[in-house]
Amino acid sequence: MKRGKKYIESAKLVDRTQQYDVADAVALVKKTAGAKFDETVEIHIRTGCDGRHADQQIRGAVVLPHGTGKTVRVLVFAKGVKADEAQAAGADYVGGEELIPKIQKEGWLEFDVVVATPDMMGVVGRLGRVLGPKGLMPNPKAGTVTMDVTKAIADIKAGKIEYRLDKTNIIHCPIGKVSFTEEQLSENLKALTDAVVKAKPAAVKGQYLKSVTLASSMGPGIKINPLKLQA
């Protein structure tokens, strides 16, 4: 893979053999971000889980204290009073059955998170093939299948993110933007890693967090000492 001049210069600032403390890694991620736009800072956590086993799956959500720096568009599947509640709480789109063809046939996907009341899951289930692969399917563990739509919307707008294992047992999550202060990024990182450590499945033996890497959208990866996050 051919790397740009800026990336090569940035990569020289990172010692590939070193595992950094959180504060040093956060300072470096800001220093190595060279794009003209406000890059997203992401964390990649390789776990000791084997996601093929149901008892080693990890999925949950956490509200980052300083949000993600991104405006999140929320679609709520609800009816009656709950639909009114969702509108009042600031949902970007609210609907039911009538949205199915719009999403299925017209490919409408102008939303980032989907919330549904439990009684609407039969309707939402028909969108599984579209929403599932994109990670947009509402899920009780992530707090997106709920009767309390007001709280769900407030949390999402405040910076709630979902974390889950991918097929290679790695969790990928945004923790903010390069324009955030080092303190804001560090606090967001701590909130996420604390939640992931707390969600450790009992069936996992040996080292739980195998490696933790921090990177901006266009910058090099910076390794964080995983043992310090599990203390």
Image (tube, grey):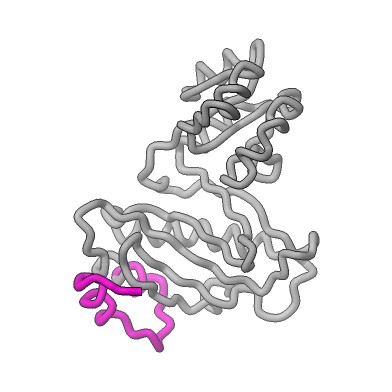
Q: Position of residue 223 (x, y in %)?
A: 43, 77
Magenta region: which residues?
Answer: 1-27
Position of the N terminus, as image quadrant, is bottom left
Position of residue 7 relative to residue 143, above or below, is below
Q: Position of residue 203 (x, y in %)?
A: 79, 69
Q: Is residue 6 magenta?
A: yes
Farthest residue to the bottom: give it. 17
User: Residue 102 appears in which quarter of the rendering?
Assistant: top right
Question: Which residue is pictured at 58% across the width and 30% down the height?
Answer: 151
* Residue closer to the observer: 210 or 98: 98
Q: Position of residue 47 (x, y in %)?
A: 62, 71
Q: Position of residue 227 (x, y in %)?
A: 55, 79
Question: Which residue is pictured at 56% across the width and 28% down the height?
Answer: 103
Q: Is residue 141 left or right of residue 34?
A: right
Q: Is residue 72 magenta?
A: no
Position of residue 41 relative to residue 2, above or below, is above
Question: Which residue is pictured at 58% across the width and 74% down the height?
Answer: 231
- Please state the total of marks drawn on the protein image: 0
User: Residue 146 appears in which quarter of the rendering?
Assistant: top right
Farthest residue to the front: give it. 105
Position of residue 109 relative to residue 135, above or below, is above
Farthest residue to the top: give it. 80
* Residue closer to the observer: 130 or 15: 130
User: Residue 81 appears in which quarter of the rendering?
Assistant: top right
Q: Is residue 18 left or right of residue 95?
A: left
Q: Is residue 202 left or right of residue 113?
A: right
Position of residue 71 relative to residue 168, above or below, is above
Question: Which residue is pictured at 62% across the width and 68% down the height?
Answer: 168
